[in-house]
Image (spheres, rainbow, N blue to C red):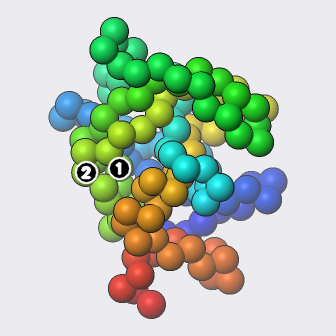
Amino acid sequence: MKIRLRNGLPLVSVELQYRNQQTALGDVLLDTGSASSVFSTDRLLAIGVKYEPEDTVHRVRGVGGSEFVFSKRLDRISLNDLALDDCLVEVGAMDYGVELDGILGMDFLASVGAVIDLARTEVRAAKEQ
């Protein structure tokens, strides 16, 4: 998959599945500096992802600041042929001063063995070398 650069930030498109519903998110930051993946509360409401009393709430911190998020288990995250089933993600407001649908972190990237090729501005599976 091609990586799009916007203001120097690497963006990709992903598909998320939750309880037999799916949505495509077009502006997801590819972030090797983020331990976990975080997605916008507003964007995930479209597929029924919302806070429920049994969800864990905690604060995440990063270069963009800190915010409270809740954890939710999604059925699947897909980045073209790179996919991960039954994944725990964070869901929050994502008010970082940059318009993003989500952040795809190391939890996903390492699990699927993603290769980020900046010379070609693409991300692919290791076997596609």
Residue at x 45%, y 71% (from the top left corner): 114
Tell me the element at label 1: strand
Residue 78 rendering spot, x and y as whole percentages: 35, 55
Residue 95 rendering spot, x and y as whole percentages: 69, 26
Relative side of 60 to 39, left or right: right
Tell me the element at label 2: strand
Residue at x 71%, y 40% (from the top left corner): 62
In this rendering, the count of numbered labels is 2
| Disc 2 to disc 1: CB gap under 8 Å | no
Q: Amino acid at mark 1?
A: Ile
Looking at the picture, tell me which residue is in the foreground, 49 or 113: 113
- In the orientation shown, which residue stands out farthest toward the top? 53
Residue 98 visible in rendering: no
User: In the rendered image, which quarter contains the C terminus?
Assistant: bottom left
Return the residue at label 1: 77
Return the residue at label 2: 85
**Dot 2 crowding, Cα within 10 Å, few <14, some 14–19, many 20+:** few
**Dot 1 crowding, Cα within 10 Å, few <14, some 14–19, many 20+:** many
Q: CA distance from mark 2 to mark 1?
A: 7 Å
Residue at x 18%, y 34% (from the top left corner): 20
Relative side of 96 to 71, left or right: right
Residue 61 rendering spot, x and y as whole percentages: 67, 34
- The answer to which image quadrant residue 19 occupies is top left
Q: Amino acid at mark 2?
A: Asp
Residue 71 rendering spot, x and y as whole percentages: 41, 29
Relative side of 33 to 102, left or right: right
Residue at x 76%, y 32% (from the top left corner): 65
Indicate whether 99 appears above or below 120: above
Question: Which label is found at residue 93?
Answer: none
Residue 5 visible in rendering: yes
Looking at the image, is mark 2 or mark 1 earlier in the sequence? Answer: 1
Indicate whether 119 appears above or below 2: below
